[in-house]
Amino acid sequence: MKRQNVMILVFQILLLTLTQIASAETIEPQLDLTGGQCRESEIINTTSTYYTNILTVLSNLRSSSSAEHFLNTSVGLGSNRVNGYYVCRPDVSLDTCEACVNATITTIDEFCFDRKEATIWYDECMIRYTNNSVSATEGNGTDPWHFNYSTFNVSATDGFPALVNTTMRGLISEAVSPDNVHKFFAHGKENFTSFEGFFGMVLCRPDMTVEACESCLLTALGRIPSCCVDSLSTWTTIMLPNCQLRYDTAQFIFDDLPLLSPSSTLPTPAPSP
Ligand SMILES: *[C@@H]1O[C@H](CO)[C@@H](O)[C@H](O)[C@H]1NC(C)=O
Ligand SMILES: *[C@@H]1O[C@H](CO)[C@@H](O)[C@H](O)[C@H]1NC(C)=O
Ligand SMILES: *[C@@H]1O[C@H](CO)[C@@H](O)[C@H](O)[C@H]1NC(C)=O
Ligand SMILES: *[C@@H]1O[C@H](CO)[C@@H](O)[C@H](O)[C@H]1NC(C)=O
Ligand SMILES: *[C@@H]1O[C@H](CO)[C@@H](O)[C@H](O)[C@H]1NC(C)=O
Ligand SMILES: *[C@@H]1O[C@H](CO)[C@@H](O)[C@H](O)[C@H]1NC(C)=O
Ligand SMILES: *[C@@H]1O[C@H](CO)[C@@H](O)[C@H](O)[C@H]1NC(C)=O
Ligand SMILES: *[C@@H]1O[C@H](CO)[C@@H](O)[C@H](O)[C@H]1NC(C)=O
Ligand SMILES: *[C@@H]1O[C@H](CO)[C@@H](O)[C@H](O)[C@H]1NC(C)=O
């Protein structure tokens, strides 16, 4: 029943698979396309004002991505209004952010150029444009969505489901904590002896309220039992328009940017030019 009228474009992994250098635990961003959706029923005319507005929104997002990890923007009025935003993961540099936003726009050009709305998730960033509200506090905050999980399970006797539940809930609390220097982003590692460890990450759009972020992430966590293997799969990714969460038994946090721990003090920002 749900999403019956929506064509889900599941993209093949186009680019390099995330590789991992086990000894150094160093992960370089390689722009992995995770998934995306365009609404099939809403093909638009490329001579329309709406189409021109999409191009302007995408252009605004592209130019901001070398300077900021997040932007939402709107162009046009009434039925021609296009709302769009991107979010880059705080553990990637602005260079990677720019390259990723650029890559999502190339993907949109390829798969969604004549569609009324599109949402594309890469590991490093996500982008969305739509005629509908993109309010971070109401409506459509949790759809469309994308999930994926490993076909390998850990042994149920390892206490893994409880580890997933406890760790991810802890990260959600940490992400929305006022002490968090990376607003609405948290990641962590727990010991999990059968594997390299247990790694978790949660992320929300930085302009959300604490309540909306927490609710979005709990929605994402709550979807695991029905979409994916109920907390036994060795990795699971849940991507929503306003938030995402991910866990893995291997490291996946990027070393592209030094991450501050919540207790660190922020460096004084350089004055804006
Ligand atoms: C797009 O709009 C133009 C001008 O109104 C029209 O000539 C053309 O047939 C339309 N194309 C489609 C695919 O609807
Ligand atoms: C952006 O993408 C275009 C087309 O794929 C490419 O030619 C250009 O070099 C890219 N720019 C950056 C900064 O990555
Ligand atoms: C967006 O477009 C859809 C389909 O054309 C329409 O049903 C919906 O009302 C539009 N939303 C807004 C906020 O105009
Ligand atoms: C960005 O999002 C916020 C929160 O939803 C909203 O108040 C603001 O108007 C948006 N800005 C633009 C330019 O759409
Ligand atoms: C949510 O999306 C649906 C379908 O695209 C649309 O009809 C509805 O108006 C949207 N609601 C909000 C609050 O944007
Ligand atoms: C899920 O991930 C696997 C492994 O990376 C990949 O081969 C597959 O295409 C992904 N499936 C979806 C629906 O994204
Ligand atoms: C993993 O667990 C699920 C749920 O118990 C099961 O359906 C699936 O077959 C298992 N996968 C493997 C590779 O054993
Ligand atoms: C996860 O933890 C919460 C709070 O600790 C608890 O209420 C809930 O029942 C747990 N869920 C599962 C599936 O274990
Ligand atoms: C994980 O294991 C290491 C090495 O045995 C230990 O030093 C560390 O304290 C453990 N961490 C936790 C959270 O238990």
Image (spheres, rainbow, N blue to C red):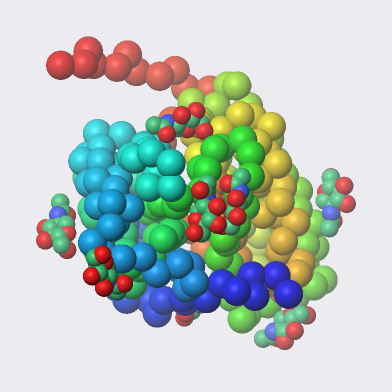
Is 71 positioned to the left or the right of 182 in the image? left
- Report which quarter residue 149 is drawn in: bottom right
Q: Residue 217 placed where, x, y %?
A: 65, 46
Residue drawn 65% across the image and 62% down it: 193
Quarter of the rendering occupied by the N terminus: bottom right
Give coordinates of residue 267: x percent, y percent.
Answer: 34, 18
Residue drawn 55% across the image and 27% down it:
180
* Any part of residue 48 in sight: yes
Considering the image in quadrants, where does the C terminus appear? top left
Is residue 185 shown above or below 154?
Answer: above
In this rendering, would 55 be left or right of 207?
Answer: left
| Nearer to us in this view, 75 or 106 | 75
Looking at the rendering, which quadrant does residue 69 occupy? top left
Position of residue 36 measured from the top left corner of the image (x, y, whole percent): 45, 66
Image position of 269 (left or right of 152): left
Q: Is there any visible trace of residue 245 in the rendered image?
A: no
The image position of residue 66, as x and y in percent, is 22, 39
> Against 79, is 224 above or below?
below
Position of residue 15 in the picture relative to residue 205 (left or right)? left
Counting every numbered tag in the picture gives: 0
Front residue of this view, candidates 221 and 169:
221
Q: Viewer-proximal residue, 239 or 187? A: 239
Q: Is residue 180 above or below residue 162?
A: above
Q: What residue appears at the point 52 percent right and 76 percent down from the top-left corner?
A: 7
Q: Which residue is rendered at x = 76% and y = 67% of the image? A: 225
